[in-house]
Amino acid sequence: MNWRLAAFVLAVIAVAVIVLLRPADDAAQPTGEPLLPDMWTSAPFQLGLAEVDGRTVLRFTTEMNNKGAGDLLLRGDPKGEISQWVAHSESGHSTTTLDVDTMWGGDTHNHWHIKDVARYWVAHTDGTPVGDEFDNKVGFCIFDSVDFRSGLPGAPTSVRHRIAGCGTRLTPEIAMGLSVGWGDQYRFDLAGQFIDIEDLEPGSYLLMAEVDPARRLQELDTTNNTAATPFTLQVQNGVRMVSTGG
Ligand SMILES: [Zn+2]
């Protein structure tokens, strides 16, 4: 065999192998615009007092919502790295590793939570926080629980992200998300859904809620992440009472 011909054949094979391998890489490249979520929070509602471990706590319900161009989707190893997946308008998706921590929600939840996706605190009526002790940071399993019927493009009419995405203890990968036009409600009776106000003086305050306080998520608009509910704490005949509105 002609060595020059053999070298040529080998070169052709090498190029063919490279060409054959390349489409896999190209397919991973997203095309079109990134369809980012836009997270916003409801003002806290259903405020009420309860007692936990002998201390007075303020319970409340909140809703984290998405009115963006695409779903919020967080995927990864709950004991390793979590990435945000963003679908693109034509094909594919991009991923960004997030600086977030996960925690196992053993206290009645029995699934994985991502920490600090939202934060709640008590502020004076001028907006200044009352103090660190009235700040509650908790973990979240995010999934579609409330359809706010946005009519937004891409908003599904049925649940797309389910609670099962938050996995179980030994799950190698979690995939939690929030569809466009959907919200996730955190009811006042959820474990951990309260702020200790045992040492709060009677008076008028704001109960603040903020989604993604550390701005770790990729989203369209971060100016709409905070909401507040005014409330009054009173003591009558030695009994504490909380009221809203009026
Ligand atoms: Zn949970």
Image (tube, rainbow, N blue to C red):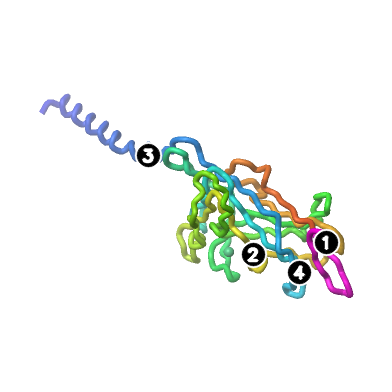
For the residue labelled by badge 4, is the local secondary structure a helix, a strand or a loop? strand
Which amino acid does the dot numbered 4 rest on? Answer: Leu
The residue lying toward the viewer, choosing from 96 and 4, is: 96
Which badge, 4 or 1, is on the more N-terminal residue?
4
Q: How far, Cα to Cα, is label 4 from label 1?
A: 12 Å
What residue is disc 1 on?
Answer: 232
Q: Is residue 243 magenta?
A: yes
Q: Percent x, y for residue 188? A: 67, 66
Which amino acid does the dot numbered 2 rest on? Answer: Arg
Q: How far, Cα to Cα, is label 3 from label 2?
A: 42 Å
Numbered disc in front, either 4 or 3:
4
Q: Percent x, y for residue 58? A: 75, 65
Which badge, 2 or 4, is on the more N-terminal residue?
4
Numbered disc in front, either 1 or 3:
1
What residue is disc 4 on?
Answer: 49
Q: Residue furthest left?
A: 1
Residue 77 in view (yes/no): no
For the residue labelled by badge 3, is the local secondary structure a helix, a strand or a loop? helix
Which amino acid does the dot numbered 1 rest on? Answer: Thr
Q: How far, Cα to Cα, is label 2 from label 4?
A: 14 Å
What residue is disc 3 on?
Answer: 27
User: How crowded is the residue under tag 3: few (<14 C-alpha within 10 Å), some, or many (20+)?
Assistant: few
The part of the chain drawn in magenta is: 231-246
For the residue labelled by badge 2, is the local secondary structure a helix, a strand or a loop? loop
Which badge, 1 or 3, is on the more N-terminal residue?
3
Which badge, 3 or 2, is on the more N-terminal residue?
3
